[in-house]
Amino acid sequence: MTPVLVINSGSSSLKYQLIDMDAEAVLATGLIERIGVGGSTAPGGGIGMLAHTVRGSSEGAAFLDATYREELSVPDHDAAFRAMLDAFATNGPALDPVAVGHRVVHGGARFFEPTLITPLVEINIDELSVLAPLHNPANLAGILAARAAFPAIPHVAVFDTAFHQTLAPAAYTYAIDAALAAHHRIRRYGFHGTSHKFVSEAAAAFLGRPLSELRQIVFHLGNGASVAAVEAGRSVDTSMGFTPLEGLVMGTRSGDIDPALLFQLARRDGMTIDDLDALVNTRSGLLGLSGASDMRDVLAGRERGDAASTLAFDVYVHRLRAYAGAYIAQLGGVDVISFTAGVGENAAPVRAAALETLGFAGIEVDAERNAARERGIRVISTDASPVTVLVVPTNEELEIARQTLEVDRA
């Protein structure tokens, strides 16, 4: 057995998975929520929630999992990490990883591959917090806690932005004052790179075709959403930019808007920078249009004939089509289109509508295949379709574990 522990440390949560890389099988998963939330500065800290699931034996298609839940005090990430260690010690399985892989959101232009964590790397991650103030500090807190708990094994940082470091200057450069952009490191970085890499490679393996021969478009559609154009396994364009705000319509984020709109709101309504930040990041997207940030609620409203839900769906799909058309042009055609993440994997109406007008590019979706509620990677295009359309469940934790092991064995 070759166990790798994968850590995804957020601002108020800690997600983890223990994966046996010999079989690429999940041994345990967990989530600790409300870190530092709800009076955590008071003596004893705030009350958080822990859910720890031990993967059991399989019976047919089902797994006999055991989940343990408890409330506990988690004033900071050190406390959350200790709680995770206690959960393993109390409920199993044995926690003796050969390496720990860490999700880090922003690697800037410094990190373009999985990187063995050293004190210098920690300093760099901290310095890059200016580009991801909501993410990198929390990622670093998880790294410091994990390195204190497991000082004798390798720790590897896997960056969300790394996969997109192959973008050409024409794709990552914004048309603003060049000196100002250089000073503030303003450029397109792209995000969800771990997912886009996993899905594009999984699609090639599933089809039995060389990755080097494929032009792919990957739609990662969750509460956060992005699309990437992938040629021969390399990202050549992606919708998210300097931050994860740009691009597609998301659960609460606006995606692409005219930046002058913000100037007008500041001048006419007196909105501050913080007001505008909250507007486009937390009060926009599907939530701003329909009152619901979850696509399932939007689809249910659309079925009822709710006008706001219908408009939200139409705006969402309009943006998907626009990016699909643009990336077909950038790639000079497309061989495979994949949908992944919560919306991409489960919302058949979104997939059908997104590709409905793209028949000119050789894209034919099979309505019955698309509507089927199946698990696992599957084809939803017709047998006659020149372009293969897939649903590919993403597995960012497995991808992080794979990259971690590659660094450990290098």
Image: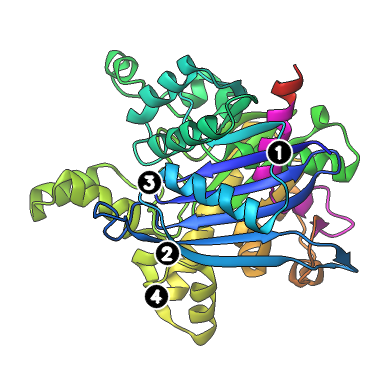
The CA distance from mark 2 to mark 1 is: 43 Å
Residues under numbered marks 3 and 2 in contact, where contact means CB atoms less than 8 Å apart: no
Question: Quarter-wise, where is residue 204 in the image?
Answer: top right
Label 2 packing within 10 angstroms: few (<14), some (14-19), many (20+): many
Quadrant holding the C terminus: top right
Q: What amino acid is at disc 4?
A: Ala
Q: Gap between marks 3 and 1, in whole Å?
A: 24 Å
Observer-nearest of 61 and 43? 43
Residue that badge 1 annotates? 96
Identify the residue at image location x=86%, y=64%. 58
In the image, residue 391 sits, relative to residue 330, either above or below, namely: below
In this picture, residue 409 sits left or right of residue 60 = left
Q: Are marks 4 and 3 in contact (CB under 8 Å)?
A: no
Question: Is residue 225 left or right of 163 when viewed as pictured?
Answer: left
Badge nearest the viewer, 3 or 2: 3
Q: Earlier in the sequence, mark 3 or mark 1?
A: 3
Where residue 303 sits: x, y (%)? 54, 83
Q: Amino acid at mark 3?
A: Asp
Q: Residues within 10 Å of mark 3 (few under 14, many from 20)?
A: many
* Sequence order check, earlier mark of 2 and 4: 2
Q: From the viewer's perspective, is residue 193 above or below residue 72?
A: above
Q: Which residue is the site of mark 2?
A: 286
Earlier in the chain: of badge 1 and badge 4, it is 1
Q: Are marks 2 and 1 in contact (CB under 8 Å)?
A: no
Amino acid type, mark 2: Leu
Measured as percent of width and height from the top left, residue 232 is found at 75, 28
Which element type, helix, strand or loop, lies under badge 4? helix
User: To which residue does mark 3 refer?
Assistant: 76
Q: CA distance from mark 3 to mark 2?
A: 32 Å
The answer to whether the residues at label 2 and label 4 have Cβ atoms under 8 Å apart is no
**Mark 2 and mark 4: Cα distance apart in space:** 10 Å
